[in-house]
Structures are given as C-alpha cells and as structure tokens.
Image (spheres, grey):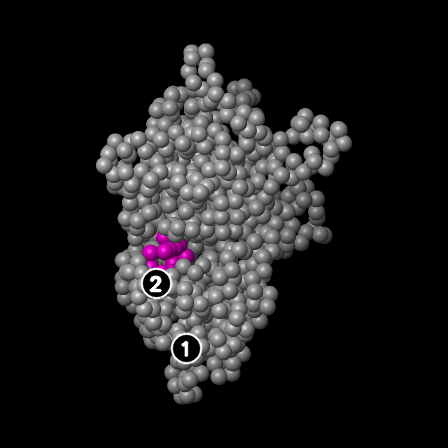
Amino acid sequence: SIPEPQREAWKKFAAKGFRTQEDFEKEVVRHVETTLARSMFNCDETAAYAAASLAFRDRLITQWNRTQQRQTFADGKRVYYLSLEFLMGRALDNAMLNVGLKDVAKAGLQDLGFRIEDIINQEHDAALGNGGLGRLAACFLDSLASLNYPAWGYGLRYRYGIFKQEIVDGYQVEVPDYWLDFNPWEFPRHDVVVDIQFYGHVRKFQDTQGKQCSSWEGGEIVKAVAYDVPIPGFDTAATNNLRLWSSKAASGEFDFQKFNSGDYESSVADQQRAETISAVLYPNDNLDRGKELRLKQQYFWVAASLYDIVRRFKKSKRAWSEFPDQVAIQLNDTHPTLAVVELQRILLDLEGLEWDEAWSIVSKTFGYTNHTVLPEALEKWSVPLFQNLLPRHLQIIYEINLYFLQSVERKFPKDRDILARVSIIEESQPKMVRMAFLAIVGSHKVNGVAELHSDLIKTTIFKDFVKIFGPDKFTNVTNGITPRRWLHQANPRLSELIASKTGGLGFLKDLNILNDLEKYADDKEFKKEWAEIKYANKVQLAKHIKSTTGVTVNPSALFDIQVKRIHEYKRQQMNIFGCIHRYLTIKSMTPEERKKLAPRVSIFGGKAAPGYWMAKTIIHLINNVGAVINKDPDVGDLLKVIFLEDYNVSKAEIIIPASDISEHISTAGTEASGTSNMKFVLNGGLIIGTCDGANIEITREIGENNIFLFGNLAEDVEDLRHAHNYGSHTLDPDLAKVFEEIKKGTFGDAGAFSALVGAIEDHGDYYLVSDDFHSYNQTQTLVDEAYKNQDEWVSKCIISVARMGFFSSDRCINEYAESIWNVEPLAPEKGETDGLGK
Ligand code: GLG
C-alpha cells in the first residue's frame, strides 16, 4: 500500500463518481469519445447505453471500493452465497434506481439527445439462470446490499446463459445466448487467478512426525479468473460484490512446448477444453442429468471460491477455530456441496489439521437450502465418475460417510435399515454419491423455502435425518422478492401512487409500510387511479403482444397469465386444456349467452429444457390452440390464447404488472415455493392457485377472500396416485371432451399430442390433472364472476398489495442472517453516504 505521506495526494484525487446532471453528461461524453472512440456524429443508442452504463459503473465501483475497505477494517463475519445461477436481468435501470439517480440520468440523456427508455432497452439480460432458483439468488444479492450485510456472491461466468427461445411453426427452437459481446458491468480481475486441479491420483505418505498424510497429485490444471460485478444496495452507499469465475487454460511451458514442437492444433484444443468449463449454463430446471462437465463446473467454481474465502480469512491471522465466526457459507441447493469436501481437504491436506478439528470447523460453516422434493431433481453423482475426476474428494466423502454412519449406528443400534437409507453412498450399480445427504451432514442448518415445503422435507425425503440430528437442524425460511426490482422498477406508476399515499419511497425498504394502503381499499378516487394504472400496464403488454405475435388483444379483457418454466408439475397442460374447455363452451353457446361472458386473454410464457420433450409438446399445443381460437369469428374477443416467446427477467418486468389473474397451479406438494406468485400479487393482480408452496402463506397474509384456491391437497396426493395405478381411474368428463377435440385434429395432427394425452388417460396421470380439472374450471368461473364486479375486484387487489409486506426478500435475508448465518449489518459511515444521489 501507499506510504502515509503520499496518501494525501490519493485522497485529493480519489474518484467520486458523478452526482449532478452536468457531471453525468460529462462522464457519458467522455466515455463515448475516449472509452468507445466515437463522437456525436456516430453515437447510436447502443453507444449511449454503453457510455451511460460505464458512467454508473464508475460510480458503483467507487462505492464498492469503500465498502470493501470498510468491511476489511471491521474484520467481522461475512456471508458467502454460493449459487450456480444468478438470474440478474438488466443492470442499468436497477443501478440508476438503487443509487437514486434515475431522474438525473433521464434529464442528462435527454440533453444529449436520447430517451432513457430506449437506452435501457439496449441492454442484454444477464441470464445466468434457469428460473426461480437463480432469480432468488439475484433478489438475495439486492437485499444483502440494501441491508448493508457484508456479503459476497460466488458464481460462474457462463459465456452462454440460458438459451433464447424462438417459436417457429408453433415449436420451440433454441438459440444460443451469447451475451458477453459487450458487458460494461463486469471487472475482469486478471490478478485474481486460481489454479484448479482435476483428475490425477492420491499419494499417501508419512510426514516427519510419522503422521499419515494424503496428497492429490498429477492430473491437469485449469485457471479460474475472477470477474467482479458490483451490486448496489438501494438507498445506501453499500455496494457488494458478485464474483464470477471464468475458466482459462493454464498457459505456460506445457502448451508452449507442444506449440513449438509443431503440435499447434492440440495446444489450442487444450485451451478450448479448459474454456468449455464455464462456457454454458445447463438449461435444466428441476432436473439432474449427471453429466461430467457439470460436475467439473461445480468443482471448478467451488474450489476457486473457497480458495478466495480461505485466502481472505488467512489475512486476518486468526486461529482456524475462529473460521466459522468469520465465515458463513450458504449452499444454494446441492450444486455447491463439494465445498464441504473441499474445505475439509484444505484443512486436512494443506493446512495439516486433524480430522475432527477440521470437521468441526467445516460443519459449523455451511448452511444448505433445499429447493425441491422432486426425485428427478435430487443430485447424485456416479462414484466411478467421481473417482476419475476428483479422487481425493471421493476418499474424503467415504470417510465423512464412515464417521457419520458410525454415529448413526451408535444412536440406533437396533435399526439396520436406517444405515442404507441415510448413507451418502447409494449402493446401486454403479454406486452413487447422494449430494443432498452430503449437504445435510456437512451443514449446521438445512432450510426449505416455504412452510409446506419445509414440513415436507422433514416428513418425507429427509425424515431419517430429523431423527438423527434432531428437528432443530431443520428450519424454514420462506422465500421473498426484492420490491426494488419487482415493484419500483417494473411498475413505476404503481410505485409512485403508493409513494404518494405512504409518505415517500420508504416502503421499498420496509415493505410492511404497504399496510397503510388498506385504508384506501374503498376510496373512490384512489381506486380509480389504481385501475387506471393497471389498464395502462395492460395496454403496454397488449402492444408487446401485438408487436411480437401480431395478435390484437383487448386491454379491457381479463388478462390471465401463466409465465414460468414449462414443466408437467407446474401444469401448463391443465391451463391449456382449460382454454380448450372454455373454447368448446363458447362454441356451444347462443350469441345471447356469449354476450354475458367476460372476455379473457390467456397468456403463456416460459422455456422448456431442450431435452424435455413433453414440455416442448405442451408449448406446441398452446401455440396450435392459439392459432385456431384467435381466428375463430365465433369467439372474437371472448378468448385469445397467446404464447409469448423467450420469457426472461426483462420481459417479466412488462408482463407481471399487467395481470388481472395469474396461475400458480402446480400439483399440491410439488412446487417448493414459487416466487412469481409473490411478484404478481405485489403488482396488484389476484391469483388462482393450488394449496402449494408459498401460495399457502400468501393466502394466510392476504386472506382467503382475495385468492382463488382449488384442487386436491398435498396430503391426498399419494393416495390418489395409488388409486390411479391400482384402482379405477375415471377421466373427468369435461377433460374427456377436450381430449376428443384434440384427437379429432382440431388443433393440428393429433399424433403430435398423443403422449401428452396418454400420460393422463393411460399412464397414471401422475400430476393429477384429471383429478383437479373440475375444480379448476369451476374456480375459473368464479374468477369470471368476480371480475365482472370491478369495484370489488379493485378493492381485493388493493387489500392484497397492502398485506404483502412479508414477502420482501429483506425479511427473508434478515431471517437467514439471524437464524442461520449469525451475521450483523455493517452500515456505511456518515460521510460515505455522500456518494448517494439524494
Ligand atoms: C426452485 C423451486 C421453486 C422455488 C425456487 C426458489 O422449484 O418452487 O420458488 O427454487 O426457491 N428450481 C426452482 O426454481
């Protein structure tokens, strides 16, 4: 560091970041002219976006530096959130709002000849995630920074995020998402590079004291390079870090030799192989495929992150026993579970600690969040694959398992079966490592993401572990969403109205302030403004629908929206069958009867995993049904069916504020939480849903009168499935009519949909579509009726929003901090906030 006498100069010239409109414009022009080497004669919107982003980035990084310094001096406990997915979406709008300078930027851009909306729309989404799990991680980062927690996110810098979806002739087509062409939000840290080892063998030896030691040797090395993304808190100078690792070939003699000896091609191939590790996000949501490259990604990211964390800890020169007082690591699902093993390896093999001492540190450091009970999503890795890729880690896993099973045996000496049930190694052919079990054994807390889900993991998949470790190890932290992005940014009109009634933007930091709105639930003037905002948001979505699909929809119709990953358990098939049922009903009506119907637009959106054929079939059916209904003159405005291509975070920001009703209709017990349910209600839409995930807690908060619940309960699912397989399974009569219509070819070649229909008719209807179909349609009729009474409808929406405070990710993060991480916020000092816009 710089010697004391020279620091004055540094302080004098320290970067501050702009504060005024004039300074902002100066920065933009400077970036256009010098960073981008353009001028006012060829500065298009892309360049203006780039320059505006760089101006904000400069500002953020200044605050970032101060935040990091402050945290280093304070030397307190930090949280590390390990997630293979961070579904960030766009950064510019968020940065402008969080630092409170959007108005300044708007005026500045206008002065320079641009409209802020056009500039914001230039940005490519950072789509490093599949769905809810990745977006949750992004909301958490926003809350951690906004609440001043000293926290880092660690992830992978995929060159390709989730694919872009195109719809061609009704089918999903995947297009690669190359998003790094120009990304102003990241800082490459070419000085932060970690060597990551793969393959090789384990050498056993005795050290000079005669102690048995192991060393992992040989194999190959890949380099992990850090890229830092600043995460601004809302209305605070605190700016946290998201560190993403990118893989790079270990350069040096080896390649060079090959190159010199004429083997140019293979030296390049090595490089490509190394870079493949962080090349692409696996596009599966709630599905584990067990591919070697995925395990490589996991180890690469976990090893680099732990190296970084341990290095930071070692700088403080504390005793190892203090590690858990300085470091809390949260495992977002089982994807980073190898961190447990890697930390044990570091302490044992590299730092020379004894097993018990090391293990006591490890198991106090980690917390594990489970996000699903679906068996196909629970990660398992084959032992032979492990043995080859990570031989030392496999040994350590066996040892962890041995000590664990010995403790179980001591506790339950008479129960032989329990050992096989809870073993981290599944005795199958080939043997498998059960990652969730490893995560439980290696963590001090395990949490589910909504009450029902947290109860289910305790009574089903992790039941034995509750017996072994006691119930206190298992807890619930119901998910939340950040109101900054999902209300203030996505729905500026509503945010402004709320601010005008609740005394400013304080509700964005304490969402319970929304309670103040309840007194306006019957206020005529307020309701009028409320309804106008919803209508304006629907007009905006209608425009988007028109421009992307060519279909004209009536903004006065009821907008019914289901946007999320396409999955059989989420039951988009039930929704589209419901649309067909509605269509058949309309067709059978007289014109007089039709006049009494409430017009509806059914809107779908979501990606199917490229290998998930059934999900792709559902998309195909939705599109074909839309093609028939949307041009049927008997139907007109009464029903439109729309599939919106390429659902992502920035589209969600347009779609969610425009809903009247949204669908969260998973088979009870299958959706761990859901988070879009919260986003829709927070934006003044009602929901139709099953008693599943967070729907249950939403109901408790907003009241049963304000939600449309239907369907079988989680506790009945098992019996129903059993009855399907062993008893008689009669198809719901309305569903039978829907199937007849599909089979007639009304929606194109019936053969294309035979598997979809067959899964319900002939193959056990695992997701209980037929069982719930009647109650689903009946409830949709109640929705129609309720919507006709607009006055009451708007009151319901206002009351619901007023009661949504609980679902802020701030509440959620505070719960993690208190009950799992044991960390305290570290607020910026007074002077430091001078970085803020306000
Ligand atoms: C999972 C679950 C969702 C949950 C989300 C965040 O399926 O129900 O809301 O994590 O906890 N794979 C997911 O998206």
Name the one closer to the observer, 278 or 740: 740
Q: Position of residue 449 (x, y in %)?
A: 35, 49
Residue hosting label 1: 737
Is 668 within the magenta? yes
- Residue 725 image label: 2
Q: Which secondary structure dominates the residues rendered in magenta?
A: loop
Span shown in magenta: 666-677
Q: Position of residue 565 (x, y in %)?
A: 47, 57
Q: Position of residue 202 (x, y in %)?
A: 50, 25
How many numbered marks appear? 2
The kind of residue tagged 1 is: Lys
Query: Dividing the image into 4 quarters, which one contains the N terminus?
Result: top right
Mark 1 nearby-residue class (10 Å; few <14, some 14–19, many ≥20): some
- Residue 351 image label: none
Q: Is residue 731 left or right of residue 219?
A: left
Asked whether residue 73 appears in the rendered view, the answer is no
SS type, badge 2: helix
The kind of residue tagged 2 is: Asn
Residue drawn at point x = 55 percent, y = 32 percent: 198
